[in-house]
Image (cartoon, helix red, strand yellow):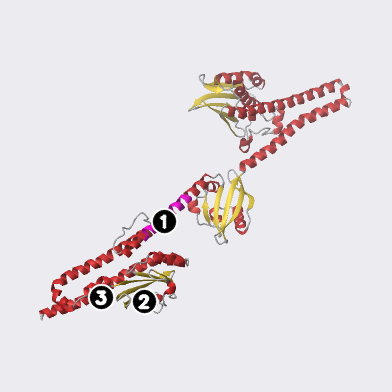
Amino acid sequence: MLTLAFVFFGYFTLIEFRELQFETVSESLESQSRMLGDILKQKLSESDKSFISEWCEKLSSSGGQRITVLAPDGTVLGDSQSLPAKMADLSIRPELRVAMKGFTGTAVRYSFFLNRDVVYVAVPITDRGQIIGIVRTSDTTKRLSHVFEGSYLKFSIMVLLMLGAALIGAILLANGVRRPINEIKDAAVRFAEGDLEYKLVPGGAKEIAELASALNHMVEELRERLDVMTRERNELESLLGEMVEAVIVVDNKKRIVRMNQTAETIFQAQFVKSSGKDILEAIRNKSLNQFVIRSLSSSSPIEEELTVIGNPDKVLQAHGTQISDPQGKPAGALIVLNDISRLKNIDQIRKDFVANVSHELKTPVTSIKGFLETLKDGAINDPNASERFLNIAIKHTDRLTTIIEDLLKLSRVEQDADRGAMKLEKGSVCGAVQSVAKFLEAMALERGIKIIVECEASLEINMNRPLFEQALSNLVDNAIKYSGPDSDVLISAKRFDKEVIIEVRDKGCGIPGDQLPRIFERFFRVDKARTRDKGGAGLGLSIARHIINLHAGRIEASSGIGQGSVFTIHIPA
């Protein structure tokens, strides 16, 4: 009785073990089907049927797991053991009918061709809630057949001895099936999280080893493509960052997609904070907003000048080009902005120079011609009138000569700078300052002005002394002309850090702040009538600036109405 009980126990244990194995195989096939579904989702979305068929052929194996990929209506797209065209209609299979409804279908059928049971598992592949395909995997029970071969009577007699070993073997077998599947599942999770350096170690069944190798190959190609994309992106970022032009890319809804450093500087906007925002929200410039709208709607490139209000204002040459997607539909616009403020300023200076030089030359020539015509008409016979008219004509001739000489000086200084022909020698700064002060002392005393010199005797710089004295003389001459009687003009020189700083300070009428940036332009005058009365041609400061530039220095001015002026020369020590 006890033996019979053991026999029945062993028999029913065998049945339960068989069901456990079928369940294990089903779970394994389901995990594999879901993994394959994740791999094939993109290709099914792209309707790449040729890839699916070729991919299934690569997974073909004799007597092993069979993989079938079907369309949502049951049409076979690929099979690892047969050609789709030669296969019968599979849509009537129970596991596939369940999968077509969006659930996992499982079935076990006896195969007369293989002479054994086959487990089928069908899993739907979904994308955004829609079924786009079905993956069916199947496997035989070949690994379990040896358990059932032979006589149940002999098995019943040996069940007491084999029961423990069978249970242990079953556990080991189950773990052997689950372990590689779990490893592949864990690897897929790591790949999805971006860990593309991880690699699977192929092992276990042949099919699983091939799947692991295929996943490793897929990840390697994906990593290479990501490296290429990252490198191209970095190159693009570097190129945009080095461009002097401002570059802004917007989508078809005017939202900022890309902005380089120059654009951030011009519009005082950070890309991190502006990305994804409307162009008018991120950059509050109506002209730019309207230009972007026109660029988005225009099929051909457009150009326009835009003004950005600031301190100072900027003039931008804007170029707008519509961007299209791969299907040729408008996807946004590329805006390139070139800052032409300096060119505009230079053009305005050129126009002012032409107008000023024409006026400066025309005034004395017109006066000379008028007085000569007056003398010709009879005034020459009047000794007093003729002498007065001739003196005035001579005065205007001297003025004309002064203008021409100043222009020639300026031209020579610029030519020497272009050719690098000016030679510099070490010289005493104090000696040059004292020489200028002595030269202009008589002129200052006539106006009741005292020149004060404060200079460190040891100061030396590399200089062209005649030109350096000319520049300094122009500054002191202006200080004397525009200072009131009984005032002082201070010339100081000192060393600060790695520079020699020379200041010419007066207590004159001063210069308005809005005109300070232009005082070094040729023929520019703060008060044209008063300057002309004092004999100035408007070239002295321009000549001084060019000479100081030749000495690798710079000249600055600070002033205020009624507060006098300070001209500061900075030259490397």
Which residue is identified by label 2? 95
Q: Earlier in the sequence, mark 3 or mark 2?
A: 3
- Nearer the observer, 92 or 400: 92
Residues in magenta, as a range: 214-233
**Residue in the picture at 58% in, 50% down:** 336
Q: Earlier in the sequence, mark 1 or mark 3?
A: 3
Mark 3 crowdedness (10 Å alpha carbons): few <14, some 14-19, many ≥20: few
Check disc 1 and give the amino acid type.
Answer: Glu
Q: CA distance from mark 1 to mark 2?
A: 35 Å
Residue 568 - label:
none
Residue 160 picture quarter = bottom left
**Residue in the picture at 50% in, 51% down:** 271
Q: Secondary structure at mark 2?
A: helix
Is the residue under label 2 in contact with that under label 1 (CB below 8 Å)?
Answer: no
Residue 146 pos. (x, y %): 23, 72
Is the residue under label 3 in contact with that under label 1 (CB below 8 Å)?
Answer: no
- Is 558 on the left-hand or right-hand side of 174? right
Residue 255 pos. (x, y %): 53, 57
- Nearer the observer, 131 or 144: 144
Check disc 3 and give the amino acid type.
Answer: Glu
Residue 290 pos. (x, y %): 61, 55
- Nearer the observer, 363 or 132: 132
Q: Main secondary structure of the magenta part?
A: helix
Check disc 2 and give the amino acid type.
Answer: Glu
Is the residue under label 2 in contact with that under label 3 (CB below 8 Å)?
Answer: no
Mark 2 crowdedness (10 Å alpha carbons): few <14, some 14-19, many ≥20: many
Q: Secondary structure at mark 1?
A: helix
Residue 130 pos. (x, y %): 44, 71
Which residue is identified by label 1? 221
